[in-house]
Amino acid sequence: MKPKKSARTPRETPGTTENRLRHVLFLHRVSRVLSSRGQ
């Protein structure tokens, strides 16, 4: 069974937020690279 996203365990929360921050930074970096390539 897959765990529901709505039900979070306290241990799982920090990792999720960290992954989100990394994902955001990654997207920001990629968008910057793409914009520089476009020019």
Image (cartoon, rainbow, N blue to C red):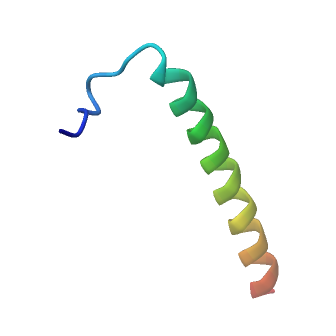
Q: Residue furthest left?
A: 1
Quadrant where the C terminus sits is: bottom right
Q: Position of residue 38 (x, y in %)?
A: 75, 86
Q: Is residue 13 above or below residue 32?
A: above
Q: Position of residue 6 (x, y in %)?
A: 26, 27
| Picture residue at 68% right of the left edge, 56% below the top | 26
Q: Residue furthest top?
A: 10
Q: Position of residue 25 (x, y in %)?
A: 70, 49
Q: Answer with left or right where residue 14 lies relative to residue 29.
A: left
Q: Answer with left or right where residue 23 lies relative to residue 28.
A: left
Q: Answer with left or right where residue 5 lies relative to residue 10.
A: left
Nearer-the-camera pick, 30 or 38: 30
Q: Residue furthest front?
A: 1
Numbered circles on residues, count: 0
Examine the image and state in which quarter residue 28 appears: bottom right
Examine the image and state in which quarter residue 33 appears: bottom right
| Picture residue at 48% right of the left edge, 17% below the top | 11
Q: Position of residue 4 (x, y in %)?
A: 23, 32
| Picture residue at 48% right of the left edge, 22% below the top | 13
| Picture residue at 72% right of the left edge, 77% below the top | 34
Quadrant where the N terminus sits is: top left
Nearer-the-camera pick, 10 or 24: 10
Q: Is residue 1 above or below residue 38?
A: above
Q: Is residue 1 above or below residue 13?
A: below
